[in-house]
Image (spheres, coloured by chain):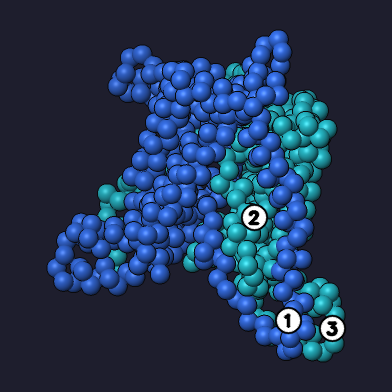
Chain colours: A blue, B cyan
Amino acid sequence: MTAVPESNSLTASHDTAASPSPAPADRRRWVPYLLSLPALALFAVLLLVPLAMTALLSLNSFGFYTGIQDVWQFGNYLEIFSDSYFHEVFLRTFRIAFLVTLICAVIGAPEAYILRRMRSPWRGICLLIVLGPLLISVVSRTLGWALLLGSTGLINQGLMAIGVISTPIEFMYTETGVVIALTHVLVPFMVLSVWASLQRLDPQIENAALSLGAKPFTVLRRVVLPQIIPGILSGSIIVFALAASAFATPAIIGGRRLKVAATLAYDEFLNTLNWPLGAAVAILLLIANIVIIVGCNRLIERRYKQVFE
Amino acid sequence: MNRNSPLALVFHVLFLGFLLAPILIVCAVAFTPEGYLSLPTNGVSLRWFYAIGDNPEFVRAFRDSLLLGALSSTVAVAFSIPAALAIARHQFPGREVMTALFLSPLMVPHIVLGIAFLRFFTQIGLGGTFTGLVLSHVVIIIPFALRLILASSTGMDRSIENAAASLGASSFTTFRRVTLPLILPGVASGWVLAFINSFDEVTMTVFIASPETTTLPVRLFLYIQDNIDPLVAAVSAALIFMTVAAMLVLDRLYGLERLLVGRGQE
């Protein structure tokens, strides 16, 4: 998984071919549709149909003895909206996602800035270390945290050896543990996003501010920060969306009892076998995700129009 | 030249330590000579790496993952090339919508896609099959392939193609002999990024894989949910070593920053 696409910058117009005569020009009109037809057909059958079927499934009902009933009703959604158990799960999901986003912004943005100020060989090496984990399987990385955070894990052993604590702190199966591991999984996206916005920043502006007598902290606050805020915000959208729908990390670190929305849907599908309810949870997660991504993107683009141009 | 303050460097070292700690601990534990989870303080041993060979389900899952990654990224690239050429070089009604559609799997949580594909494949009789795995992986990795191919075909000089056409080359010959070689770097790196994303995918695959056809990350995930032992550390460490090797090759060939940041954002 990599960053959310910057579709605007990728689709810049490059249609330079001029048509010599009207007849081929008429035929040319169909060329782009013919070229993209295979992919369009694939997406219609393999993305839109399955998603539509899931939406319909979420309206069906389920009984322990009757199985999935082919009826149309909003019972599953009403159950999710009225049952305090589901409130708790969704609230926990968004609480974790919010904390992870906040921590990623607080540590990821300064790291991107420090990386940019590094010298040539070190910069490349450090960037490789920061971005490399994105390519390593999430399961392997989460396993590392399970080894570190366990009651006999390295962190607890270290803290007890230096005498900070006398009994091990329980990180496993807690929200703290999930937040730590998810921050590790997602912080490269924040660095990447801030890094991209730093590329547009001219170092001479900082030097100008310094030569005019500004203190380094003032330069950071008044010159650098305003210019990288769009990067921090678009990084936050990516991190929040991925954290809210994360599955493997909360499943391993949170265990079976500390449920988030994604592990709840998984359980309804593969353990309780209540597919309609699981589908309703998934549809709600999808809607929340799209509203957050599209809504925030619009907001940022409107607010920071001048920075993007 | 602006320099980082000592405080900033301390922060930087802590940050790198945070990123590396879980990865290093997995690699360290994998070398333990003991029969339980521990750091290799009494010498190192490869016994848990040999133990992978005694667990055919891991070996089979690894083989299936490689095959799945190779097949689905090849299919994804084949679908992406014409679509990318259409988007990069033509102005037509519906172009923005189409681009958004092709990139939309990035916005849909993989848990939702897993559920959608589980429902879809069981309805049409593809549940738990390898074909189902390939089809679903093609959909989720097309955005990665498409973005890199789009980036390489957007900046292309069209006059060479026009020259080939005016010299009498058919449009297929022009594509094969002129266009394809020119966008090949984008195609190759798109394939690699697609492969990596297919190989690492776990959230969606856990829904549609069956015990007979499963991938290595899914096998590892299900194993870890039951118990954590040095064997999974060894499998993870082997995966990490392979990823690092692939990463270094990729960095030399294409530049990791360019691959991940994307040319469109520079």
Camera-nearest residue between A151 and B159: B159
Camera-nearest residue between A110 and B130: B130
Circle 1: element type: helix
Say which quadrant the C terminus of chain A sits in. Answer: bottom left
Question: Do badges 3 and 2 share one subunit?
Answer: yes
Give how far across and how far down residue A55 sits, in percent. 63, 35
Q: Residue at x 46, y 27 (%)?
A: A90
Mark yes or no: residue A55 visible: yes
B230 relative to A184, above or below: above
User: Would you name the residue on which mark 2 appears?
Assistant: B102
Circle 3 packing at 10 Å, graded few (<14), some (14-19), many (20+), is some
Q: Mark 2 lies on which chain?
A: B
Circle 2 packing at 10 Å, graded few (<14), some (14-19), many (20+), is many
User: Would you name the residue on which mark 1 appears?
Assistant: A25
Q: Mark 3 lies on which chain?
A: B
A202 relative to B66, above or below: below
- Between circles 3 and 1, the one closer to the viewer is 1
